[in-house]
Image: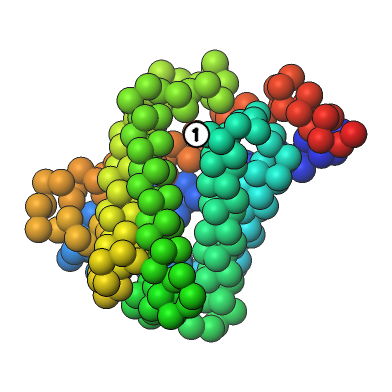
Amino acid sequence: MMNRLRRLETFARAGWLARGIVYCLLAYIALTSAGADDASPQGVFRSVRDMPGGPLLLMLLAIGLALYGAYRFYGAALDSEGKGQEAKGIAIRIGYAASGLAHFILAWAALRLATGKSGGGGEREQEAAGMLLDMPLGETLLGVIGLGFLAGAAQQAVKAWTTEFMKGVAPEAPAWVVPVGRAGLAARAIVFAIIGYSLVRAGWFGAAGEVKGLGDALSSLTENSTLYMLVAAGLFLFGIHSLVEARWRRIRDEDVVARLRAAAR
């Protein structure tokens, strides 16, 4: 049991660390470059690759992101956070699984760049949407994925408003964790909402060319420079929030132990 807990904690903390680094670098690129043309995870990976020792750093990021993906899959399968078997709990656990898959994809993209392979072009989201639309019921599925992002945006906004995210943070965490977490989650909610809206339009209203990834969602705000700067700064704070979770998030509490014991029976 203790080995499983240590594994879970290692996966989680390494993943939060990697996610925090990616978001901080993404926001840095958006805030310091001329626009947000390269403000995407792939842009971050390319920037890291070009640093001294970049391929090694990129490999470490890939490992961290993969560990976080494993942690999310683990939580979805074993309900390590106690979301339950009701409809709401199942929906949250499906979201965890989707998050796990997304982080595995990011880890794969970072690994490909680290080994000298192409990370793909800037139109991959539109290409993926087009492939999905060609499948049976593809339009419906793409729209449902968009609704999932919109639901995720709502969840992030609720967490920011209610400070629900503090329930899992150790009490010795500093007071500044609260405003940083709220600002970061609010910015992420805006980005998720933009991505979700573009997917719904693509699936149900025939606008596949408008599908947005993270970088595209941020770029779409450049016409309003104040909002763009606020959201980019908020995403930097979300990166800091992820680093806070890597340091102060409680993993080994009695509830987690009880759930893992029940799952092992």
What's the residue type where badge 1 is placed?
A: Val
Q: Nearest the camera: 26 or 71? A: 71
SS for callout 1: helix
Q: Position of residue 197 (x, y in %)?
A: 28, 55
Examine the rendering and report whether any part of residue 185 can be seen. Answer: no
Side of 172 where 8 appears, left or right: right
What's the colour scheme?
rainbow
Furthest-top residue in this view: 171
Furthest-bottom residue in this view: 117
The image quadrant where one finds the C terminus is: top right
Report crowding for label 1: few under 14, some 14 to 19, many 20 or more residues within 10 A (C-alpha). Answer: many
Q: Which residue is mark 1?
A: 244
Side of 201 where 140 appears, left or right: right
Q: Nearest the camera: 186 or 65? A: 186
- The structure residue drawn at horizontal position 34% and vertical position 34%, both measured from the top left corner, is 157
Q: Position of residue 83 (x, y in %)?
A: 61, 31
- The structure residue drawn at horizontal position 20% and vertical position 43%, both measured from the top left corner, is 230
Side of 240 where 250 appears, left or right: right
- The structure residue drawn at horizontal position 33% and vertical position 25%, both measured from the top left corner, is 161
- The structure residue drawn at horizontal position 53% and vertical position 83%, both measured from the top left corner, is 117
Q: Look at the picture and state if 154 lies above or below 105.
A: above
Q: Position of residue 65 (x, y in %)?
A: 58, 56
The mark tally for this picture is 1
Examine the rendering and report whether any part of residue 6 can be seen. Answer: yes
Q: Nearest the camera: 232 or 129? A: 129
The image quadrant where one finds the N terminus is: top right
Q: Position of residue 228 (x, y in %)?
A: 18, 51
Quadrant in which residue 36 is drawn: bottom left
Furthest-front residue in this view: 137
Furthest-right residue in this view: 265
Quadrant in which residue 143 is drawn: bottom left
Q: Look at the picture and state if 14 lies above or below 223.
A: above
